Image (tube, coloured by chain):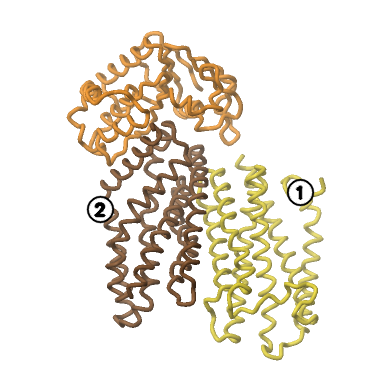
Amino acid sequence: MLLINNLSFYRNNTIIFEDLNLSLNNGQITQIRGKNGSGKTTFLEVILNILEPKNGDIFWEGKNIKKNIFNFFNVTTFIMDQNTSTKKLTVLDNINFWKGLCASKLTNADILLLLETFNLLKYKNTKVMYLSKGEIKKLELLRLILEQKKLWILDEPYNHLDNSSIEILNQTFKDHANKNGIILFASHFNPSINNLEIIDFH
Amino acid sequence: MMLNFLINPNKFNILADIIFKPLLIIAFIILILGLILVYYSPLDYQQGLTVKIMYIHVPSAWLALLTYAIMTIYSIVGLAFKIPFSFIINKAIAPIGAIFTTLCLLSGSLWGKPMWGTWWVWDARLTSVAILLIIYVIIIFLNQTFESREVKEKTVAIFILIGSINLPIIKFSVDWWNTLHQPASISKLSSPSIDISMLKPLLVMTIAFSLIGLIIAILRIKAEILIRKRDL
Amino acid sequence: MVFLKKIFLFIKRESQIFFSNFVDLCSNILFFFLSIFVFVFALGADEQLLRTVGLGIIWSLLLLSSTLSLRKFYEEDFNNGVITIIHMGGMSYELIVFFKIISHFLFVQIPFLASIPIASVFFNLPIIEVYNLILTFIIGSLILSCLGSISSSMNLLNKTNFSIGSIIVLLFSIPVIIFSVGINNSDSNFNNLINLLIGIALIFLGIAPWSSAAFIRLALRNK
């Protein structure tokens, strides 16, 4: 479980958030909701140690993540607002790169099946720059399943997705939560997920 | 601490307010004195009247180097101990150093035309000073470039540190390479190879130049502190 | 073992990006040849003159044309966030920078080598100078890759002043060009200068990962 203790962050001496306490238990889906510019993305980046908090600590399974950051990265998948797929490479090249990076145990048949469910199989040898925005986002979300990590942190996962993809994404979230995974995402969209914990940012 | 004004903007402001007017008067008096001394200084038996360019050329060269050395020290202090005042000083005094370097190059060029027969030669001393000018200009440009203040200050400080390799090259270029530029005359303070009648006006002019530089620096640093306070 | 595989994958990805971008490199080389032509037209076709200035011209034009592509060093990876993902995959930023420099050296600078003999034919350079030129360019281009890494990581958040990165690279490549061209002077010691160049390259291979990683962290924090 992820424990956040008295976390504060200042940018240019203005408070973004202060004294934030949060605990994410296994099997819990949490959404961060808030206006544009309320610091949702900043909060996620502070958790991932990209930004330095002013004070406060973050614990993963009882250990401070600052001291063993790579152990924490080892269990975390981070889906950014931007698309991390390389535009000049084909879909399969991108997937193989991600797969090697996290030492995933999925076989090629699994990956083809995965592409089939996301409706991307016909593009497997197409360069990413020829895909539409929604398809690039779906490719990005493939990383969730590919990396097989316990903690999922997502920034605006619902952008550019059509209704059927949103259904698939929600189902994926539920499956992961049932397998004792932890999900934390920032979005202003209201997804239809039961037992959704909501944190409001203002 | 007596030297707190070197790292604390408030203390600096207080001290600057006290010493500014006396400094202005002293600088004016010394400058007039220096110009009178230069007027009555002896002519060189080879160079004639043109030797008087030296009284502008040498002080501005020294101050160009001194300004860069101060910036280097403040960059180390600022990066190592995270003192924001040092970044303020870096930003404030870079144009002053650039002006002194330009003055040095221009006066040297004017001096070189009658003496060497050309405005410019690709000599080690001249080239390294020209590179110093380019480094100053890059620092000024970098100060205008970035939106985020933290990025700007740290980038400039690191760039100043890398560029400080040039200082010893300028200093020793006349010893390391055979150059047209004459070697330093006043490096050995015990027995300078310059006559005392020329040394006196030169030192007075150097003091006058440094005081003028200090006055401009105080004004610029105070303005920079105000800008920074407004942004916070 | 897993770690070595990650490094291998990283370099493989760089090579894939490079080959999808092959035209870009070819235009750099074309730029190099065209500027040689411009120089020759400007100087006139005096064979003796061209032979004396040839080496200097080739070196400075190599420098200019390889700075053309330096802006793309980190820009794309930084803007689409891949650099964070690779970092989360278990590579520190220093390591990423180091292998980025190595792959830039392998896939962008080394292809320039092929163009050097052709370029020296235009100037009728003696064979010993061509040999020296190739040797010094191998070392010098490694230094250039390091400089490019430093200057482009410095300019990640710079959205207004694009040419300052190239200016900084040119500024710090002055010693490289002094020693590389000086190697052909009859009164200079070949071994000393080569050792000096290798020394500079090693120093930069030490400095560049450290400083570029610091700049990348700074940029990520202030994005």
Asked if residue B224 shows in the view, the reply is no
Q: Quadrant of the N terminus of chain B?
A: top right
Locate residue C19, reporting x and y percent: 26, 47
Locate residue C3, reporting x and y percent: 40, 34
Colour chain C appears in: brown
Tag 2 residue? C23
Asked if residue B171 shows in the view, the reply is yes
User: Is the same chain shared between marks 2 and 1?
Assistant: no
Q: Label 2 is placed on what type of residue?
A: Val
Image check: B147 left or right of C128? right
> Which corner quadrant of the image does residue B73 belong to?
bottom right
Image check: C180 left or right of A131? right
Q: Is residue A194 above or below residue B217?
A: above
> Which corner quadrant of the image does residue C65 belong to?
bottom left
Specify the label residue A5 is tagged with: none
Q: Write down the chain letter for disc 1.
A: B
Q: Is residue C96 above or below residue C171?
A: above
Q: Secondary structure at mark 2?
A: helix
Task: Please give the name of the residue rendered at 28% of the width and 53% of the height, measured from the top-left corner.
Answer: C24
Task: Please give the name of the residue rendered at 51% of the width and 16% of the height, measured from the top-left corner.
Answer: A61
Q: Label 1 is placed on what type of residue?
A: Phe
Query: Which chain corresponds to the colour orange?
Result: A
Tag 1 residue? B5
Q: Secondary structure at mark 1?
A: helix
Query: Which chain corresponds to the colour yellow?
Result: B
Structural distance between the alpha carbons of marks 2 and 1: 58 Å
Q: Is residue C71 above or below residue A192?
A: below
